[in-house]
Amino acid sequence: MSVEIIWLLLMALAVFACILSGVPVLLAIAGAPTLIALLAAAGGDFDLIFFQAVPQRVFGVMSNPLLLAVPLFVLMGYLLEKSEQAEKMLKSLTAALGGNQSALALSVVLVSALIAASTGIIGATIVMLGTITLPALLSAGVNKHMSSGLICASGTLGQIIPPSIVLILLGDQVSNAYFEAQQEAGNFAPDPVTVGDLFAGALIPGLLLVCLYAAYVLFKLRGKAHQEQTQATQRDVSLSNLIGNIAPTLGLIVAVLGSILVGVATPTEAAGVGVAGAILIAAAGQGGLVARIASACAVLAVLLLVLRQLGVFGLDYADGSIVLSLKTFVSIVLAAIALALLLSSTKAIISRDVLLPALRETVTVTGMIFGIVIAASILSLVFRGFDGDEHVADLLQSLPGGAIGMLILTMLVIFLLGFILEFVEIIFIVVPIVGPIILQSDISPVWFAVLIALNLQTSFLTPPFGFALFYFRSVAPTDIRTLDIYVSVVPFVLIQLLALGLVAAFPVLAIWLPSVLF
């Protein structure tokens, strides 16, 4: 065993020991490798010149236009959560579909899928599901294991159904890994891998997972009658009220996801549209004059989009030139009015204490994500300083089965890491190491990324550090023990692994839609 491998093993043990001891993850990922590198440098086994690349990597992370979509999508989700729009949709759909155990449980899956495509905030989704639907499920006679597992699993759908923070971060890393792999293979002009590709690739697998959840619910609760009518199901929900609560969220999903998939906007631009749309939805929920102002702004925005697509603006986006005409002047005036209406709506949600709390939580979450990204860059530098990439390449290439054997081992490692690490850490540690090696073969980068995303889905449910388990524990009654929660998620982890196996066996599930759209 070479000296470099010994140091690499020590670094891995140090990182995991720090994480398990309760040291903040950011410090564990950056501090432990730095300490090991300093010790190795003292013995002449590491060149500290590698640390000269840290400022450049930090600048690269902070100036990456793709990663700008992360805080915007997080803010969009928190705006919908703080304005209680997601809760309104959840209550109305639950009440409309409730009646027997199967319908009530199925409504949880359906509502979660809609919330996933609009917010993607795990904590907020699970807390809402636990607060609103858990009592209804238990009162309807659904046992605590099924109720707990269903809420925990459904609340994590936002990590695979686009737009998803997981897919954005994966898009950045897989794109870099694919470019590096193609350069090693002699292809210096590879087709870029975009977040739009990943959004399109994950859409069918995400809906497949929803269908598998629904099938499991129907199978387990088949033929069981509703034992006790709950307050939620006794309410008379009119069709207009149901549409009124769902339509704004559906419109936002179409505007954000649709603009990315049809190529009208980049993920970052679509995220900006999503934030503006979430502000209007939050304002419209207040009713009265504020609602009318928000509705007028939304109508103007749609009109401006139509004018832009028809070329009425008189703007040449290629060189930034403006053709002065009456139509251009009218378009500018309409845009100014729309901006004024948006600012008025923003002022309204500030006064209702919606915007500032959303901004505070967005800064916290974004700071955590970017801190881990930078820390993982430091770990990657130390890893490469010990020639870790070459040792991993030798290990993977020695496996039987070629590229498929490498892929299977990578999926197994990611699944096991999911028990103790967060998805951000796994993405920025594993993908830069194995991606450039695996993607030198004929494996599709989109398929590779979707498989990782499905695999990472399990990390939110696997104890002891599954985020979904922590959030559900905070709202679950005392008679549902922590062990009950752990047991409840086992069937849903198996369902997620089944979905992973199906996409692995049938790559067309991930690569067909991107090939059609792009």
Image (spheres, rainbow, N blue to C red):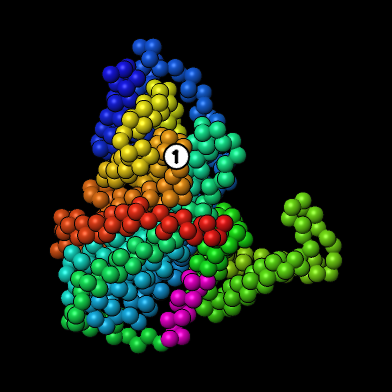
Give the residue at x 36% y 27%: 394
Foreground pick, 397 / 413: 397
* Residue 329 visible in the current orientation: yes
With respect to residue 149, does 464 lie above or below?
above
The spot of residue 160 in percent (x, y) is 40, 57
Label 1: element kind: loop
With respect to residue 53, does 206 lie above or below?
below
The spot of residue 449 in percent (x, y) is 43, 48
Our reading of the magenta stretch's main secondary structure is helix
Give the residue at x 62% y 61%: 264
Q: Is residue 274 left or right of residue 388?
A: right
**Which quadrant would residue 224 be assigned to in this image?**
bottom left
Q: Where does label 1 land, which residue?
A: 441
Q: Is residue 52 left or right of residue 452?
A: right
With respect to residue 115, does 288 lie above or below?
below
**Which quadrant would residue 293 be assigned to in this image?**
bottom right
Foreground pick, 459 / 497: 497
Q: Is residue 233 left or right of residue 403?
A: left
What segment is highlighted magenta in the picture?
239-251
Give the residue at x 75% y 66%: 311
Q: Tell me, yes or no, whether the highlighted magenta stretch contains residue 509.
A: no
**Which quadrant would residue 141 be assigned to in this image?**
bottom left
The image quadrant where one finds the N terminus is top left
Foreground pick, 288 / 70: 70
